Image (cartoon, grey):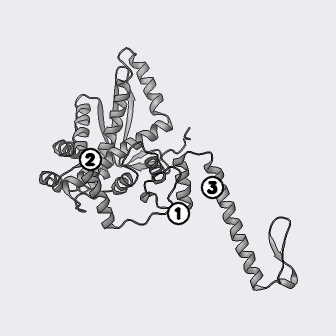
Amino acid sequence: MNRLERQPHGKWRLTNKERTPLARGKIKAEEARKRKRSRNRAILAVASSLSVPALIGIVALSQHHDPGLTTPISTPGIVRTETPKVTEQDEQKLIQRAVEKRGVKLSQQEQELWQGFSPLPPIDDENTAPEFIKRFHETLNRMSQSDNPYFQESAALLTSLINNHDANVIFGRKVIFRGESVATAVNTIYLPNKIQWNIAISRDQLFRGHPLDLPLILTHDARYINNQIAFISGLGPSLPMQEKHALAKKRFNTPNAFLLEAMSGYAAEAEAHIHAFGLMGYDRALTRSDHDAITLGFIRNGENSDSPYWKSFLLMRYPNMLKGWSLN
């Protein structure tokens, strides 16, 4: 019979007379079991101090899980770590169920509205700013004519702000936010008697993107602005404007509030996209966009902007979202 001896630090070794293949196999099996137990203890030790969304992220990452394919979890104590790849047929079924849930019907008018709105070639001449302005306003105009309620509401808000000089649109070759290139970014300017929003838009995005990309992004931005307006309006008429602005700055410059805004904005974007699919059908040439992963993630995570699973999905998809911040 072979005999295994343990060294002081827990490693297995064989006596000189017992270095057989069978013994070596036992050593490897035991060491594998020890590594697995150690890894599981480490995960549980970290998870014990975190919330359920954070736990979901840890387990998903430890399993090399694709963050774009998160499955809704019905019970907080049960975490699914393996989700099959979504085929085009499965994707279409998921979207179709979401469309039917909202009762959205096909619209020929909507199809015609966006079919002729193909991307334009990039313009490099700095003196062609009127072309950018024209394209932007044409986008808002089509959004206002759309049967998509999310596009309508977003266009109405942005048009009103621009006409009242409460918002400016700035075009740049690239828009950088928190060190990364983005399609748009909103900068809030607190003036003595009002708030002004500067909406920066990437010229490349404006002219090279899919027809629905900019409307979806502007829907996201409009939700963010609307949330700010609602917060200040809810403070009451008796509070001086400067104090309202101070509270708004404090509210929107914290990581938790920023994350909530991201959850709300991306949810509005996903809802607008679901309605676009319902109005125009599952036409990959027309309704597909760079935002497909967000829309599918929203559907697969409960279609709830406040869901902890939606939060977990966004944090995994955008790991630099809270770079430099730590959540309370």
Mark 3–mark 1 Cα distance, whole angstroms, equals 14 Å
Q: Amino acid at mark 3?
A: Ile
Where is mark 3, residue-wise?
43
- Where residue 10 sits: x, y (%)? 81, 66
Q: How many marks?
A: 3
Judge the density around disc 1: few (<14), some (14-19), many (≥20) Cα neighbours within 10 Å. Answer: few
Secondary structure under the numbered disc 3 in the rendered image: helix
Q: Is residue 308 visible?
A: yes
- At 59% from the left edge and 45% from the top edge, which residue is drawn? 50
Quarter of the rendering occupied by the C terminus = top right
Q: Looking at the image, do the residues carrying marks 2 and 1 touch, with CB atoms under 8 Å apart?
A: no
- Where residue 12 sits: x, y (%)? 80, 72
Judge the density around disc 2: few (<14), some (14-19), many (≥20) Cα neighbours within 10 Å. Answer: many
Mark 2–mark 3 Cα distance, whole angstroms, equals 41 Å
Q: Amino acid at mark 1?
A: His
Where is mark 2, residue-wise?
215
Mark 2–mark 1 Cα distance, whole angstroms, equals 33 Å
> Marks 2 and 3: which is nearer the front?
3
Whether 7 is drawn above or below 108: the answer is: below
- At 25% from the left edge and 34% from the top edge, which residue is drawn? 157
> Marks 2 and 1: which is nearer the front?
1
Where is mark 1, residue-wise?
64
Whether 153 is drawn above or below 321: the answer is: above
